[in-house]
Amino acid sequence: MPGLLRDYFVVLPDSVAGHTVAGQLPAPEVTGAASAPTMTGVASAPTATGAVPAPAATGAGACDVLAVPHPSGRPWVLARPLFRKVSHLRRGDDALVLIGPDRVPEAVLAGLLEGARDRAGLERRLARLPGLHHVVAHLSGETWVRGTASGLRRIYHARHPQAGTIASDRPAVLAHLTGAPLDDGALALRMLDFLPHPLSRRALWRGVHETGAGYGLALPVAAPGTAAAPGPREYRWWEPPPPELSLTEGARRVGEAVAASVRAHVGGLDRISCELSGGLDSTALTFAARATGPAELSLLTVAARDRYSEDETWARRAVAAAHDPADALAHHIIPADQAPYFYADLAATSAELNDEPLPVAPGRARAHLLLGRAHATGSRYHLTGYGGDELFLGLPHAYQDLFHGNPLTAWNHLSGLRHQLGWPLLPTLKALLNRSAFPQWLAGAVTTEPQPVTRTPLLSWGVRQSLRPWFTDHARTLITEEFRTAAERAEPIDRWRGRHVDIDAVRMGARHFQAMEDIGMTIGLPVAAPFYDDRVLEATLAVRLPERISPWRYKPLLVEAMRGVVPDALLARTTKDHMSSDEHQGLREHAPELADLWTGSRLAEHGLVDARHLLRLAAEPFSPVLVEHSISSTVAGETWLRTAENTWPTHQLTPTTSEAVQ
């Protein structure tokens, strides 16, 4: 089965060519539970959405597409949202479309749209909602579209030869509509474990561009008497808040934001599920979900093979603390011997066409098992604690920021961290006093030299990475040139190193979470990570740095935010389990599958990897090379490329539009 684009939307110009493009949209085959129930729910949406299903081709590839029109009646926004909801309102020439986890009532839409004279006015009103929606608006003769500041929802655009600029949340849709070829430079970059800002924005197809998180895309209309509209413009709509709040006030805001995000996803649903790993993040969301009052709440824990793991013990404690005879709460523990190792069932990744290769792909079978078990409980929505580490754990880079205004406090905190991590004194001081600019750092952020894996002070703009020994000279050249070119015009996300790294880490994690969402679509279960809500990110960044992170407290902001929701005994956990042994063992258990992967390697055909070197490593899973260098991103690139090169079925769609709301 080729990769299927199950979920997407596009924004089209008001022109005959735009209407023609609408009929060329990919209409992937509808398969089983992945869409049937949800499509019915979308199709029967209340009239407040202002959108109706557009008739699609009949037969094996038939699917429903929602159409929101331009005033002319031509299609403006076409969406196949599956689990997400499309809310729409038009007032005269102004219109607003929100695509997110919950349906926004008409009265709320009216309060957002009416009186908003420009983008800034509308953005101030949108800040009242959980920050989980794609936004498409038409104000003052201009269409603009944006995702989220966290990067959970992204926007791409490309120029169609006849229709001009079209936008979408899925780059593969734009590649399909414009005939864009794959970009080897962007593909080579994805073989790195971490792709820092701004290189993370490099789309995998030539001519397809990603709008930066925190930025929107303005699509001006054609001037009277002309056929072509001006090109798109990016504008910044989001700025991180100043870190001014105390821990007490910040914790209150974080708690409120988490609760609102959870309600936006699962509020009012009768049967939901949560991944309860036993860690602090998943425990917090479990109790937040319980507070929404579902009739049935299923909690799922994957037991660890490591006998020293503490997760299962803490998960059982959480269930015991949450137990109430009035609640229909079920705890499902998946035995360790049923949990796949990493690199299991690599061929199954072809069922999802992600926007890009993601290093979490080798763990796909494990995630599929968990979500499949959750779906089997009858859950209508599944919550995870993804994003908690990036938001609340705190990265050492932040002490660079603190050092500028409060050097004694910064050194006090950093000394505690230095002793925990074994950082030598002089290298730590040297790193702390380093003032290199972001472009300078970015130009040298990749190297052919091995990097020390321990006792390395992490106080710069990010993590310096080594090029893998199985990369070809061509791949090395492409990667280093990409970094050097980006450095020539690169600007950091924030002028402060710590905030730059913090925000970039959140956005990187949000990208990785897309793999979970796409697996959920394959199974037929929506999956959410409420911590990636913009309001949660904003509340976190607004807290004063020395109170937000500490070398002597584990996630102090999250602990205080959930006090009174999560029992104090559970908030006392200060440890975190890791699954590195499952990854190393997976290299041995699935060596034959890895060997098959490198036989006829697509990456090798593109001249990016040495397939013979990879075949040798597959036969030597405990090679020192694999101890020093992770292979997960290369595996992800190979499996993604095989999926992306398969074409998906297409059918001519003739969208019809309806103005249900005036």
Image: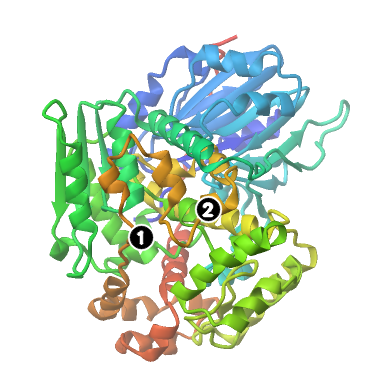
Q: Residue at x 61, y 27 (%)?
A: 126
- Where does the image place residue 495, in percent across and percent down from the top left? 73, 56
The residue lying furthest to the right in this view is: 225
Residue, disc 1 = 349
Q: How many marks?
A: 2
How far apart in space, not on screen, are marks 1 and 2 (Cα)? 24 Å
Residue, disc 2 = 506
The residue type indicated by label 1 comes to Thr
* Circle 2 SS class: helix
Q: Which of 277 and 70 is in front in this view?
A: 277
The residue type indicated by label 2 comes to Val
- Where does the image place residue 356, in percent across and percent down from the top left? 51, 58
Q: Is residue 162 left or right of residue 83?
A: right
Q: Is residue 485 visible?
A: yes
In the depicted structure, whether residue 488 falls above or below residue 354? below
Q: Can residue 376 be seen in this view?
A: no
Residue 306: numbered disc? none
* Circle 1 SS class: helix
Q: Dot 2: few (<14), some (14–19), or many (≥20) neighbours within 10 Å?
A: many
